[in-house]
């Protein structure tokens, strides 16, 4: 298809991606980069193309992400202060090479699903990372405003403000954010009493996007199973590919909609049967109501604790001012 062809050619240059899709589909923003326009972008993961990079020790998308984010976590203190009243310390600093799940050092992993469709065995490889939800409960609940949604759709955790309370993981339908204890500003404020580290997850490579570069995983995939483009263009491509393969789309309605779509020739219900929810290994159930909507009991719980939120926000703001952190461009107020 003309639109797809243009898109594939444009992978070589992020600026051209933007202009190319816009010109062909009439839904983008010709002549400007995503960073300049602040308009919404989406990614597409095509499971009919991903082969899990089984010929490599580490899948190309996973190792690209790892390389890009290798210096994100500072030196972990030793010993890590015991948090009170809970005693859970999450320390991945000695297990940085764990690739089988999400960790603070691994923002994307490949789930291998062995499915049986009409008597035929089939292996499906599913790259998993943050879905960059339209209404991210992880950002809504954060009492420090450390977790926020960019205008372009990327949901980002500001590690300079995060206390590692992990509320974002509790409310995320897929429990995506992962904690590393023994790092972050809680060590300087009330170690042992407040916070327990810093939360980490995929940030859609916002810094690369701002420099008109493709996210590392998108750029590295040798099979072009990952695409990025304007929201409308990606939705169109997902729909046309799903129709062509008589397949299915995931991410369009789940949790109220997301900026990350999957397209698959295998029903997601079948894929999900192979995914029991384990820490760092999200499932893929299709019925995912929007979290933190007004009717969600979680929202009521959060709204019942405004004092803590305000106090926490005050501490975070003070710390932010003291540390004279650099401005975050593109953050929605
Ligand atoms: S998938 Fe989870 S962590 Fe990612 S934006 Fe959605 S709620 Fe937040
Ligand atoms: S978008 Fe960037 S941070 Fe997210 S999984 Fe891909 S490479 Fe990693
Ligand atoms: S998405 Fe691409 S790079 Fe990642 S495992 Fe699949 S084929 Fe390999």
Image (cartoon, rainbow, N blue to C red):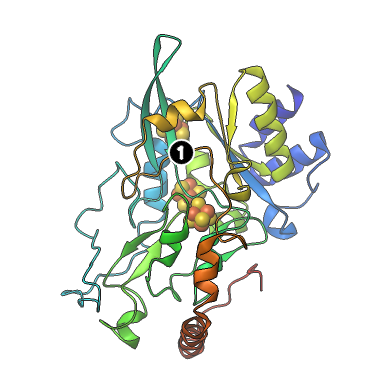
The answer to whether 107 appears left or right of 24 in the picture is left
The residue carrying pointer 1 sits among few (fewer than 14), some (14 to 19) or many (20 or more) residues within 10 Å by Cα, namely many
327 lies above or below 225: below
x and y, in percent, of residue 320 in the image: 49, 84
Task: Quadrant for residue 4, please give it.
Answer: top right
Q: Is residue 204 visible?
A: no
x and y, in percent, of residue 90 in the image: 25, 63
Task: Quadrant for residue 116, please give it.
Answer: top left
x and y, in percent, of residue 61 in the image: 43, 40
**Residue depicted at 76% across the width and 24% down the height:** 2
Q: How many marks?
A: 1
36 lies above or below 160: above
260 lies above or below 200: above
Q: Nearer the viewer, residue 103 or 33?
A: 103
Q: Nearer the viewer, residue 68 or 154?
A: 154
Q: Which residue is mark 1?
A: 284
Residue farthest along the top direction in this orientation: 119
The answer to whether 166 appears left or right of 98 in the picture is right
Q: Nearer the viewer, residue 168 or 97?
A: 168
**Residue depicted at 38% across the width and 66% down the height:** 166
101 lies above or below 250: below
Task: Quadrant for residue 271, please give it.
Answer: top left
- Quarter of the image where the C terminus is located: bottom right
Residue farthest along the right direction in this orientation: 26
x and y, in percent, of residue 162 in the image: 43, 73
Q: Element under label 1?
A: loop
**Residue depicted at 34% across the width and 87% down the height:** 189
Q: Is residue 233 visible?
A: yes
The answer to whether 7 appears left or right of 177 in the picture is right
- Quarter of the image where the N terminus is located: top right
């Amino acid at each position: 298809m003309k639109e797809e062809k243009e898109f594939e050619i444009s992978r070589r240059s992020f600026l051209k991606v933007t202009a190319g899709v816009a010109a062909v589909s009439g839904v983008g923003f010709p002549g400007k980069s995503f960073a300049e326009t602040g308009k919404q972008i989406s990614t597409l993961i095509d499971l009919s193309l991903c082969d899990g990079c089984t010929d490599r020790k580490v899948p190309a998308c996973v190792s690209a992400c790892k390389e890009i984010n290798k210096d994100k976590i500072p030196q972990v203190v030793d010993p890590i202060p015991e948090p009170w009243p809970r005693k859970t310390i999450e320390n991945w600093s000695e297990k940085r090479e764990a690739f089988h799940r999400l960790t603070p050092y691994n923002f994307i992993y490949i789930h291998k699903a062995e499915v049986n469709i009409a008597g035929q065995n089939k292996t499906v490889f599913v790259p998993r990372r943050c879905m960059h939800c339209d209404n991210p409960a992880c950002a809504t609940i954060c009492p420090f405003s450390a977790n926020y949604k960019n205008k372009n759709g990327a949901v980002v955790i500001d590690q300079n403000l995060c206390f590692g309370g992990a509320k974002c993981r509790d409310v995320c339908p897929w429990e995506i954010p992962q904690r590393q204890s023994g790092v972050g500003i809680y060590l300087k404020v009330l170690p042992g009493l407040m916070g327990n580290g810093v939360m980490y997850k995929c940030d859609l490579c916002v810094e690369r996007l701002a420099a008109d570069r493709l996210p590392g995983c998108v750029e590295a995939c040798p099979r072009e199973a990952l695409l990025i483009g304007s929201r409308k263009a990606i939705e169109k491509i997902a729909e046309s590919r799903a129709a062509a393969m008589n397949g299915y789309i995931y991410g369009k309605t789940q949790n109220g909609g997301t900026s990350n779509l999957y397209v698959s020739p295998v029903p997601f219900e079948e894929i999900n049967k192979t995914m029991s929810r384990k820490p760092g290994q999200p499932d893929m159930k299709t019925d995912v109501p929007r979290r933190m909507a007004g009717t969600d009991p979680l929202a009521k719980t959060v709204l019942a604790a405004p004092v803590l939120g305000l106090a926490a926000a005050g501490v975070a703001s003070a710390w932010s001012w003291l540390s004279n952190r650099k401005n975050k461009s593109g953050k929605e107020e």
